[in-house]
C-alpha cells in the first residue's frame, strides 16, 4: 500500500521515559520525573472522592452533550453554554479543529518551536504546515513574523488556522496583551482564518501584561480558545480539554467529534477540579517557588535558561545534550531533550515539588562539576 508522504514523515510521539522503566534500568529506588509538565502534587483529594462516588455508574455511557460540564464552565467563564465543547484532552481539540476547518490543500500556520501537536495533527490531516520564525533570543512567538508569513502566503496557501500557544511549550515564553491585540486587530477581517489561542498553562502565568483571552474571544469573531485540565488541575491521566468559541464553530466540532470522547469519570473530575480553588492556589505556589529556585540555581551553574510563565523551563545544555540527559537519568532525574536547533541541545525541565527540584539541581551540580 502507498502511504502518504505526510504520514510517513511522522514519528510516534515520544513521551517522557516512564518511572518504572527508569528504576529497573538503572537500579534506582527513587526517580524524579520532570519530563512531561505534569502536576507534581497529584490530583486533588476532592477529585478523588468525586470519582469514587461516580464509579458505580460505569455501566452508563458518558453524557455526550456535556450538560453539567457546560454548566460549570459557563458559570466559571461567564459565557453561554453553547460557546463550549470538550475534548479528550485539548490535544483532541487541536486535531478536531484541523479536521473540521482545514481541508487538504489548505494550511495551518504557527511559530517554529511551538507545541509539537500542531505539526503532528496538521500532517496527519494531510494539511500543509507552515511556521514563522521565533524571536531568537526570547524564545517566544513573534506575532509580527506570523503576520508577515500570513500576508505573504495566504493567497497561495489558504491558511485556515493559526495556533498561538500562550505561554508556549516547550519554550515557556509568552506574547503580551499589546502584541496579541495588535495582531488580532490586523487579522479581524480575515473571515476565512481562525486564530486558536492555546492556554494550557494559563493558571501558572504571573506576568501582569498577559492578555485577557476571554475578552478577546468576545471581541474578535475569528478567535477561539483551548484550555486543559491536564496541567494546573492535575488531571493529565483523565484527558479533558475545553474549547471556547462562537456557537457556529462549536456546533461544527460537535458534529465531527466522537460523542463519547470525554469519559464519565473525566467529566465528573473536571467539574470538581474547576472549582477547587484551594488546590489551585497550592499548585500555583509550588510552581512559582520552584521556578524561582531553578532561576537562582541554574544561574549559579552558568546555564543559559529562559524565564518561563509555565510549569517548566527551557535551558541550553552546557555539554552534549544527550550526555546530559543520560547522566541525569542515571541519577534518577528524567527530563526532556528538545531538538529545537541543529547546533545546540535544549532541555525542558518541569517544575516538581521542592524535593524533586533539589534532586534535579544536585544532579546537575554533580554532572557539571
Ligand atoms: C500539554 C499541552 C496541551 C494539551 O494537553 P492535553 O493533555 O491534551 O489537554 C495543549 N497545549 C500545550 C501547549 C500543551 O503544552
Image (cartoon, rainbow, N blue to C red):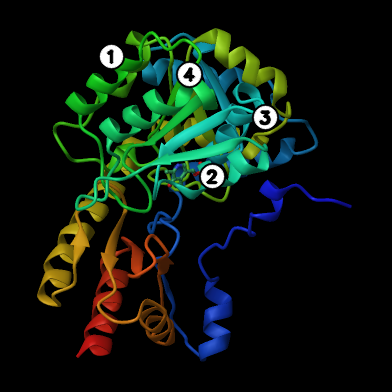
Where residue 142 appears, as percent x and y from the top left, is 27, 38
Vertical placement of 272 versus 67: above or below?
below
Name the residue that disc number 3 marks.
104
Asked if residue 335 can be seen in this view, the reply is yes
Mark 3 or mark 1, which is nearer to you? Answer: 3
State the SS at label 4: loop
Vertical placement of 75 versus 104: above or below?
above
State the SS at label 3: loop
Name which of mark 2 and mark 1 comes first in the sequence. 2
Where residue 32 appears, as percent x and y from the top left, is 40, 73
Q: Which numbered circle lies on residue 65?
A: none
Q: In the image, is 117 to the left or to the right of 153? A: right
Name the residue that disc number 1 marks.
185
Name the residue that disc number 2 marks.
119
Mark 3 or mark 2, which is nearer to you? Answer: 3
Residue at 24% across / 76% down in the picture?
A: 361
Residue 367 occupies which quadrant of the picture? bottom left
Where residue 37 appears, as percent x and y from the top left, is 41, 56
Name which of mark 4 and mark 1 comes first in the sequence. 1
Give neighbour class at mark 2: few <14, some 14-19, many 20+ (Cα, 10 Å).
Answer: many
Q: Which numbered circle lies on residue 193?
A: 4
Residue at 29% across / 15% down in the picture?
A: 186
Amino acid at each position: 500500500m502507498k502511504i502518504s508522504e505526510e504520514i510517513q514523515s511522522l514519528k510516534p510521539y515520544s513521551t517522557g521515559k516512564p518511572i518504572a522503566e527508569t528504576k529497573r534500568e538503572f537500579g534506582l529506588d527513587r526517580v524524579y520525573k520532570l519530563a512531561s509538565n505534569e502536576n507534581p502534587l497529584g490530583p486533588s483529594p476532592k477529585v478523588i472522592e468525586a470519582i469514587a462516588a461516580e464509579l458505580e455508574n460505569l455501566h452508563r455511557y458518558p453524557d455526550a452533550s456535556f450538560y453539567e460540564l457546560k454548566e460549570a464552565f459557563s458559570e466559571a467563564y461567564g459565557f453561554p453554554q453553547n460557546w463550549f465543547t470538550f475534548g479528550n484532552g485539548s490535544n483532541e481539540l487541536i486535531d478536531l479543529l484541523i479536521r473540521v476547518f482545514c481541508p487538504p490543500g489548505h494550511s495551518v500556520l504557527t511559530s517554529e518551536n511551538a507545541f509539537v501537536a500542531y505539526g503532528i495533527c496538521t500532517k496527519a490531516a494531510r494539511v500543509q504546515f507552515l511556521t514563522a520564525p521565533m524571536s531568537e533570543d526570547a524564545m517566544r512567538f513573534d506575532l509580527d513574523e506570523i503576520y508577515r508569513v500570513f500576508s505573504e502566503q495566504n493567497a497561495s496557501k489558504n491558511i485556515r488556522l493559526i495556533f498561538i500557544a500562550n505561554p508556549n511549550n516547550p519554550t515557556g515564553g509568552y506574547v503580551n496583551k499589546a502584541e496579541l491585540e495588535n495582531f488580532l486587530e490586523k487579522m479581524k477581517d480575515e473571515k476565512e482564518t481562525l486564530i486558536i489561542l492555546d492556554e494550557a498553562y494559563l493558571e501558572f502565568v504571573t506576568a501582569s501584561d498577559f492578555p485577557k483571552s476571554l475578552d478577546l474571544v468576545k471581541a474578535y469573531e475569528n478567535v477561539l480558545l483551548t484550555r486543559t485540565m491536564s496541567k494546573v488541575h492535575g488531571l493529565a491521566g483523565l484527558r479533558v480539554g475545553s474549547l471556547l468559541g462562537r456557537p457556529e464553530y462549536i456546533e461544527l466540532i460537535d458534529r465531527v467529534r466522537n460523542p463519547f470522547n470525554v469519559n464519565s469519570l473525566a467529566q465528573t473530575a473536571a467539574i470538581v477540579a474547576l472549582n477547587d480553588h484551594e488546590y489551585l492556589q497550592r499548585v500555583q505556589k509550588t510552581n512559582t517557588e520552584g521556578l524561582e529556585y531553578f532561576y537562582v540555581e541554574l544561574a549559579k551553574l552558568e546555564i543559559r535558561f529562559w524565564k518561563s510563565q509555565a510549569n517548566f523551563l527551557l535551558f541550553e545544555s552546557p555539554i552534549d545534550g544527550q550526555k546530559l540527559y543520560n547522566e541525569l537519568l542515571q541519577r534518577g532525574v528524567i527530563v526532556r531533550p528538545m531538538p529545537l536547533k541543529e547546533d545546540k541541545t535544549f532541555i525542558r525541565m518541569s517544575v516538581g515539588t521542592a524535593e524533586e527540584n533539589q534532586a534535579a539541581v544536585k544532579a546537575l551540580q554533580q554532572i557539571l562539576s
